[in-house]
Amino acid sequence: MATLQDVQNIILAGKAKLTPGVVQEAVDSGIPPKDILNTMIEAMSIVGERFTRNEIFVPEMLITAKAMKKGVATLKPYLAEGATSAMGKMVIGTVEGDLHDIGKNLVVMMIESAGFEVIDLGVDVTADTFVSTVRENPDTKLVGLSALLTTTMPAMENIVAELNKQDFRPNIKIMVGGAPITQEFADRIGADAYTEDAATAAVVAKKLVS
Ligand code: B1M
């Protein structure tokens, strides 16, 4: 029987191979999957604090991120309902210069679960790629941008500016998010919606297309 503390410990230890087993045990112990996910997100915050204090470095961050990804994959069937594409299409990516994708992947999972078909462009995505993907998919209803670094916020601004110039702009809604992003920033750059977390992103996505 695994506890939330066990889940946190295994992520912090960066034991990617052991993480699925511990997460599964926690699920089997009856712990709500959302609590398990929140514990894993908390673990990543602890990792960030340790990085800021120079107690750990990029390789350790990477190892814990791998463990987190394995944990999320194990939880996915319990968090995401059967996906359909009834709500329409969303194009999403982490902005140019930014390689963080754990939060973006959670958003993808929740948005798919809310009934959208998602085209995930991955990380380090340029404005040109966003624009050409929407052009190739004229039924796109939402475009999602994620940024985790203060240094890539200008890239987000630039991508939104490019999207705003396009003739297809009236047909899409732009959603932004990521740790350094705020409602004020989203308003200033001309995005349609900002959400703080993946679960809220799915709720707002549904509202935007209805
Ligand atoms: Co990076 N990193 N990192 N890192 N990293 C942070 C972000 C940092 C805060 C750590 C710190 O200093 N405390 C810091 C940024 C500081 C700043 O900008 N002010 C930082 C830094 C500095 C860096 C490097 C520059 C380090 C270096 O090389 N010296 C480097 C940059 C690389 C690059 O991107 N070019 C770097 C690299 C990395 C790794 C590759 C090692 C790894 C990422 C692995 C991966 O993602 N595949 C990594 C990690 C793991 C982190 C921390 C520890 C954890 C990030 C994470 O996954 N959080 C992070 C510290 C922290 O966040 N406290 C840190 C969990 C995730 C679930 O949360 O992504 O915020 P998050 O997503 C949330 C919400 O933001 C929201 O929903 C999610 C939850 O529900 N959300 C959206 C996200 N996108 C959304 C989109 C939406 C809506 C909501 O709509 C479309």
Image: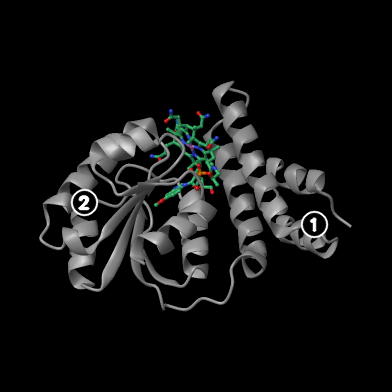
Q: Position of residue 142 (x, y in %)?
A: 32, 62
Left or right: residue 181 versus residue 165 is right
On the image, numbered disc 2 is attached to which residue?
127
Nearer to the camera, 88 or 21: 88
Instruction: Tell me: residue 69, above or below residue 44.
Output: below
Characterize the local packing of mark 2: few (<14), some (14-19) or many (20 or more) Cα atoms within 10 angstroms: many
User: For residue 98, which quarter of the picture?
Assistant: top left
- Contact? badges 2 and 1 (CB < 8 Å): no
- Looking at the rendering, which quadrant does residue 26 occupy? bottom right
Q: Residues within 10 Å of mark 1 (few under 14, many from 20)?
A: some
Among numbered discs 2 and 1, the one appearing first in the sequence: 1
Residue 159 tag number: none
> Which residue does the image show at 32% across and 47% down from the upper left?
95
Q: Which residue is mark 1?
A: 31
x%, y% of residue 169?
17, 58
| Residue type (three-letter) at the residue carrying disc 2 | Ala
Going by the image, does 91 lie left or right of 196? left
Residue located at (66% from left, 52% from top): 37
Query: Which amino acid type is shown beneath numbered disc 1?
Result: Ile
Tell me what residue is drawn at x 74 percent, y 44 percent. Answer: 8
- Element at badge 2? helix
Give x and y (percent) for residue 49: 60, 27
Q: Position of residue 202 (x, y in %)?
A: 48, 59
Q: Residue furthest right?
A: 1
The number of numbered badges drawn on the structure is 2
Image position of 137 with respect to 198: above or below: below
**Residue nearest the viewer, comparing 136 with 55:** 136
